[in-house]
Amino acid sequence: MKIRIIFWIAAVSTFLQALPLYLSMFSREFKLILIGDVFGESPSADAVAMFDQFALVVGLLALGFSFICIGATKFRGLVELRRISFLLFCVLRFFRTS
């Protein structure tokens, strides 16, 4: 399997993992479902504000990582592709362990 295909798979899977966060930014009902799973049926205003910040930060991190993976497909040399592949693996490992 080519390294570029692996980058595309990583970009798409990261985007799909963060999809609930993106949906919660645009749908109030979906956001309340996600908040209700953690904080119960009647979350406080602080819990909603905290979730909004969490969704924004983590969603943008995932989106940024997806764009970095897509941009990494432009490298042509095998040495550079291997090096960026290792660096993206390290970053992705921290993102997916939580």
Image: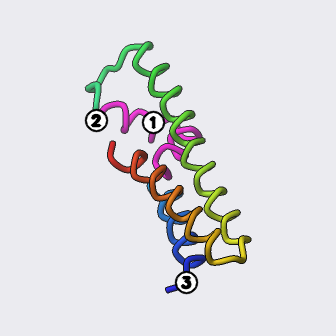
Give the number of the mark in front: 3 or 1: 3
Residue displayed at 55% across by 83% down:
2
* Residue 95 at x, y percent in the picture: 43, 46
Kindly identify which residue carries mark 3: 2
Q: Is residue 66 above or below residue 33?
A: below
Range of magenta residues: 18-37
Residue 26, magenta (yes or no) = yes
Question: According to the image, label 1 marks what residue?
Answer: 31
Q: Nearer the viewer, residue 82 or 52?
A: 82
Describe the element under mark 3 as helix, strand or loop.
loop
- Residue 41 position by quadrant: top left
Element carrying mark 2: helix
Q: Residues within 10 Å of mark 2 (few under 14, many from 20)?
A: few
- Badge 1 element: helix
The dot on residue 37 is 2
Asked if the magenta segment contains residue 82, the reply would be no
Mark 2 vs 3, N-terminal side: 3
For image coordinates 48% across by 49% down, the residue present is: 91
The secondary structure making up most of the magenta span is: helix
Q: Amino acid at mark 3?
A: Lys
- Determine the CA span between mark 2 and mark 1: 10 Å
Marks 1 and 3: in contact by CB < 8 Å? no
Q: In the rendered view, does 83 fall on the left or right side of 42?
A: right
Tag 2: amino acid: Asp
Residue neighbourhood size for the residue with mark 3, other residues' Cα within 10 Å, grouped as few (<14), some (14–19), many (≥20): few
